Image (cartoon, rainbow, N blue to C red):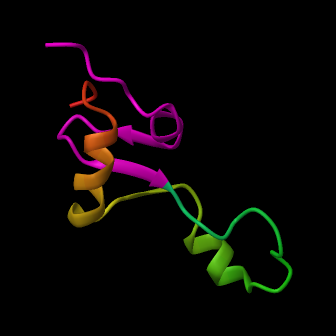
Amino acid sequence: MPKLKTKKSAAKRFKVTASGKIKHGVAGKRHRLISHNAKYIRQNRGTEVMSDADARVVKRYMPYDR
C-alpha cells in the first residue's frame, strides 16, 4: 500500500490534541476589527476545539496526525 499524502494546507491550519480533537484559530480576526466591539474581539482570542462533524473531514486530510 502506498503512503497517504497529508494536505499541507490543513496541517498548517489545524493541530491535533492529545485526545484526538482538532484545534483551530478563530475566524474574523484579520481585518475590519474597528467595526467589531471589544467583547467580540476578546471572546475570539486564541484557539477553539472544532466540532466533531467538521473534525471528521479534517482528520481525513491529515492521516498520520492521529
Residue drawn 43% across the image and 34% down it: 7
Which residue is at the front of the view, 13 or 43? 13
Residue drawn 53% across the image and 38% down it: 9
Across and down, in percent, residue 15 comes to 40, 39
On screen, 18 above or below 40?
above
Residue drawn 46% across the image and 52% down it: 24
Count of numbered marks: 0
On screen, 12 above or below 34?
above
Looking at the rendering, which quadrant does residue 55 occupy? bottom left
Q: Residue 13 colored magenta?
A: yes
For this orientation, the residue located farthest to the front is 1
Q: Quadrant of the C terminus?
A: top left
Across and down, in percent, residue 10 comes to 46, 41
Which residue is at the front of the view, 60 or 22? 60
On screen, 4 above or below 2?
below
Q: Quadrant of the N terminus?
A: top left
Q: Residue 32 colored magenta?
A: no
Image side of residue 34 versus residue 56, left or right: right
Image side of residue 40 versus residue 47, left or right: right
Looking at the rendering, which quadrant does residue 33 occupy? bottom right
In magenta, the rendered stretch is 1-24
On screen, 28 above or below 49?
below
For this orientation, the residue located farthest to the left is 1
Across and down, in percent, residue 18 comes to 22, 34
Which residue is at the front of the view, 11 or 1? 1
Residue drawn 86% across the image and 80% down it: 34
Across and down, in percent, residue 60 comes to 26, 42
For this orientation, the residue located farthest to the top is 2
